[in-house]
Every structure is written in C-alpha cells, then in structure tokens.
Amino acid sequence: MVSLNSVKGGPQVSTTYGDEAAQGGHFVPAKYRGTVKDQADMSALGREQVLRRNFRFISIVGFGCTLIATWEVILTLLEQGLTDGGTAGLIWGFLIVACGFLLVFLSLAEMASMAPTSGGQYHWVSEFAPRSCQKFLSYITGWLCAMGWQCAIVSIAFLAGTIIQGLIVLNHDDYVFERWHGTLLVIAITFFGILFNTFLAKKLPFVEVLILILHVVGLFAIIIPLWVLAPRRSAQQVFTEFNNGGGWNSAGTATLVGFSTTITALIGYDCAVHMSEEIKDASETLPKAMITSVLINDCAGFLMLVTICFTLGDIDESSRHEHYDRDLGSYAHREYDHGIGHSLSAALVFCPRWRSSIFWVFGYVTPGWNIPLNAVMVSLMVTVLLSLINIGSTTALLAIVTLTIGSLMSSYVITIGCLLLKRIRGEPLPPRRWSLGRFGMAINIGALCFLVPVFVFAFFPLTSTVDRESMNWCVVMYGGIMIIAILYYIFRGRHVYIPPVALVKRDI
C-alpha cells in the first residue's frame, strides 16, 4: 500500500503491506474500512485508508446542509442584498445563483466520483490539467482551497458570535458593546467545535443527523410565526421593486453586486468532498449526497427568502430588524436571532474537521484516534489568530470573511476548466459510478459561464463611493496571498512539492 508523509513541504511515497500495517502504525477496524470499491479507489489514487469510514448518505447530507446553512446565512446577510438589489434583486438573484451553482456542483460531484479523495480540487487539477502545468495549477489550487475554507471557519464563527452579542444587547440595556467581546465569543465557539472534533469524533455522523433535524425545524420555527403574525407586502412590491442603495449606475449593476448575499449562502458544498475518505462507498454515495444537500438547502433558502421578503415591511427599517419588534414583539425577535445563532454554532462544530481534512493529506493522522488531530489544532490556532483582527478593525475581519467567496470560486474555475479542456480534447476520463453522461460538457461550460462574472463582482464594495471603512479590501488580500503563493512556488515549492498525480495508478 502507498502512504504519504510530509517531508520538506511535499508528500513523499513509502510502501507498507498488510491489513494492519498502515501509516505510522495506524489501524482502522475492519468495519470502518469501507467497501471493496472504496479500497479499489484508494489503491488507484495511491492512498492508504487511515481514517474511519463511518459516514453514510444521510449523515453526509446533514453535513452539507448544516455546514452551508443556507437559510441562516441569508438572514444574517440580508442587509447587503436589500441595499443592492432590494427584494426583487434578492429573489431573482437567488434563482440565478442557485441554478448556476447547481451546474458547478454537478461538475464537482462527477469529479468526486472519479476521484473520491479528501484532497478534492487540488487532486483533480493535478490529474486533469495539461501535463505542462499540472504541478503549478495543483499547487495554487491547494492554496486557494486552504485559504477559502480557513476563512469560512472564521466567517461562521464571526456571524454566530455577532448574533450572540446582539442577543446580549437586546436583553441587557446596561451592556456596553465592545469588539473584543465578539472576539472572545468567536474563540469560545471555535473551541466548542474543536471539542466535538476530537473527543466526540466517533459520534459526529449521529450528531450530523440531529443537527439536520434542527436545521429543518428551525426553518419552520421562524417562518410559521411570520406567515401568521406579520403584515404582508404585495407580490408586485416583492417581485418587481429593485433597490440601488449603493449608488451604482443602474439597478442591474446593483443587483449583481448584491449577489454576494446569495453566493455566500449557496457556496461551499465541496465541503463534503474533503470528507470523502470517511464516507462508506464514497464514489457513489458522495456525489448523490452533495446534490441532495444542494437541492434541500436551495428549497429551504428560497422558502425563507420569499417569506422574509413578503413580511419585511419598510426596507430601511427591516435592514435593522426593527419590524420584528413592531410586528411580532421582542420575544419573537429574540427567538429569531437565537435560532440563527444556534444553527450557525452547530455548523461550526464540523468546520474544523472538514477544514483539517484538506490539510491531513500532507500530514499525519494520530494513532488510535484515526483523526487528523494535528491538523485540527492548526485550524484552531489559525482561527484564533484571525479572530484577533476584529479587535483592531471589523472592516479587516469582514474582508477575510468575503475572501471565502473569491478563493473557493477560483478553485472551482480552475478545476472545472481543466476537466472541460480534457473533454474538448477528447481525452479519456477516469471511470466513475455517477456520471453526467452526454450533458457533461454542456454543464461544465454553463458552470464556467456563471462563475467567471460572479467572481469579478465578488470583489465589489457595497457602494460605488467608498472610504477606508466601506472599501472591500478582499481584493487586496486575495492578490497579496496569491503573489506570496506564486513567489514561494518559484523559489521553493516547485522543488519540494510532489503533486497527487505522481501517486495515481490508473489504467485509462
């Protein structure tokens, strides 16, 4: 069997044999080793089973649904969409973005069936890119994925912490709001997630199902009171009134800028891919679970969005949530934020685990634990350090939050682009149990046509005139990190980095 160890920045190849001979003396019980197909896939990818395959279809669906938390994120970022786009822009934008991302994740799901590995995009690029640039593109894609998902952990923790701090403000008139309080909440929530990912790691699939139930119940716990008690706006107002609060040259441009709300709420279902080596019968279960999660959250998110848009009242007041106090009472307002805070905190339980799954392919799995403990700890420390930025500048932290979008969409563009080029050239693709069939090329093209323009608008600020506080500094951070990554590759990375394709043993 082939195993990976981190030596001088890159994975190296070593060989061991026997059921119990594994990386560093790891032993995975027989019931957690997966199916014969899983073992064949791991052998073809040049990898070794060192993690427990204890996730099934329903638990990985729960993982995707609760981690992306579509309806919860929509509510927390509603003000951005109302400023640029209004209710009409939010609803029609949601449908456009949902359809676009469906094409994206259909493309990724097919690749997940071809190569069900925790490396995800960086592995697929390594295998599908033209030989002349396989190594470089794989390396850069790895940076993009790592950057995007680390920012995602901070994003979810920051949103949850902000909501909890808002509840304190609502319930205690004498409370003095301080940014460092929010930072402490972010750190506390992150530690909560780390505890689950270490001491309760074996129970994560079961917890996933419970939180999926909370995710669905929470949706109806919010929308039913709104349906019954809140005043209604007319359908004409909801579906036809656009808003250009950012002062752009047209309502259309404002709506495109306002896509950031729905993009943030719908991006990231490749999170399940990075758990692929913990899924039983991954090459078939994983793509089905990914698309099921997408469809469930799309429906839940759209239902929540339409409900909110019909019950908003005055948009200027709604951006401050004042209509909940007026129409439903302060109790409903508290329950509204309380439910979102719980859901986002629950989502954070699983962030460090899937984030560490990206790292562990270069590293070490702790003997006896069968989890990437070191990688989980690294993720914790990076999150804590990034959260400290909030003490000095909320603007800087928000730029890190929006960096999630740009980084992940970049990785999608590179990955799907490599697959499409392979299809155009008529080159053989690896066997897969879940296929797009004759529609594969059309779906890949559609995904790229969606990703490229929305990637550009992801770097726009909310308003056309900006100052230091309102500027979207994400573009500066994104460009800076990419420059560092490229320079490091030129001077060191290309000498020590061994791309995953070097380990692949396929007959195609």
Image: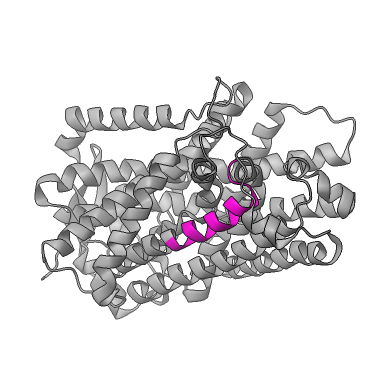
Up/down of 114 relative to 503, above or below: below
> In the depicted view, which residue is nearer to us: 139 or 503?
139
Q: Quadrant of the N terminus?
A: bottom left
State left or right for residue 423 relative to residue 462. left
Coloring applied to the structure: one colour
Residue 98, magenta (yes or no):
yes
Q: Quadrant of the C terminus?
A: bottom left
> In the depicted view, which residue is nearer to us: 368 or 500?
500
> In the depicted view, which residue is nearer to us: 319 or 85?
85
State left or right for residue 88 relative to residue 111. right
User: Can you give x and y, in whole percent of width and height, for residue 497 in the image?
Assistant: 20, 41
Identity of the residue drawn at 47% across and 56% down: 97
State left or right for residue 187 relative to residue 505. right
Quarter of the view holding residue 128: bottom left
- Bounds of the magenta span? 84-99
Residue 90, magenta (yes or no):
yes
User: Can you give x and y, in whole percent of width and height, for residue 313 in the image?
Assistant: 79, 51
Q: Is residue 276 visible from the viewing direction of this image?
A: yes
